[in-house]
Image (cartoon, rainbow, N blue to C red):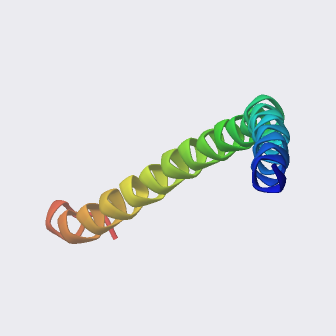
Amino acid sequence: MSDENKWAEVTEQNSKDIVDIKHSIKTIKDNHLAHIEKDMCKQSKKLDSLDARIWWILSILVVSVVLSMVGPSIGVK
């Protein structure tokens, strides 16, 4: 009988632990993942604006180099 009681206690404790784990997973999924998703969206927008600024700077540099090469040949000092 004592072995059966021990197994019954272990089984009951395991059932309680499983319920706790499921609750923890639900909490993480509902709360933390939503916050992470919002933060990722903010970072994505910041990277897009940074990407646009880099393209503008690169374009200005290319135009400057081309004008400095072509300028003397067309008489621009």
With respect to residue 12, does 6 lie above or below? below
54 relative to 71 in the view: left or right: right
> Would residue 45 be found to the left or right of residue 73 on screen?
right
Quadrant housing residue 42: top right
Left or right: where 19 falls relative to 75: right
Q: Residue at x 24, y 62 (%)?
A: 66
Outermost residue, front direction? 1
The residue sitting at 20% across, 70% down in the picture is 69
Tell me where residue 32 appears, x and y as whole percent: 79, 41
The picture quadrant where one finds residue 65 is bottom left
Of 59 and 69, nearer the camera is 59
Between 71 and 57, the residue placed more toward the observer is 57
Residue 26 percent across, percent down from the top left: 77, 31
x 18%, y 63%: residue: 70
Residue closest to the far left: 73
Q: Is residue 54 above or below residue 34?
A: below
Residue at 85% over, 39% down? 16
The percent coordinates of residue 6 (x first, y second) are 81, 54
Between residue 10 and residue 74, name the one nearer to us: 10
Pick the residue in front: 24 or 28: 24
**Total numbered labels:** 0
Q: Quadrant of the C terminus?
A: bottom left
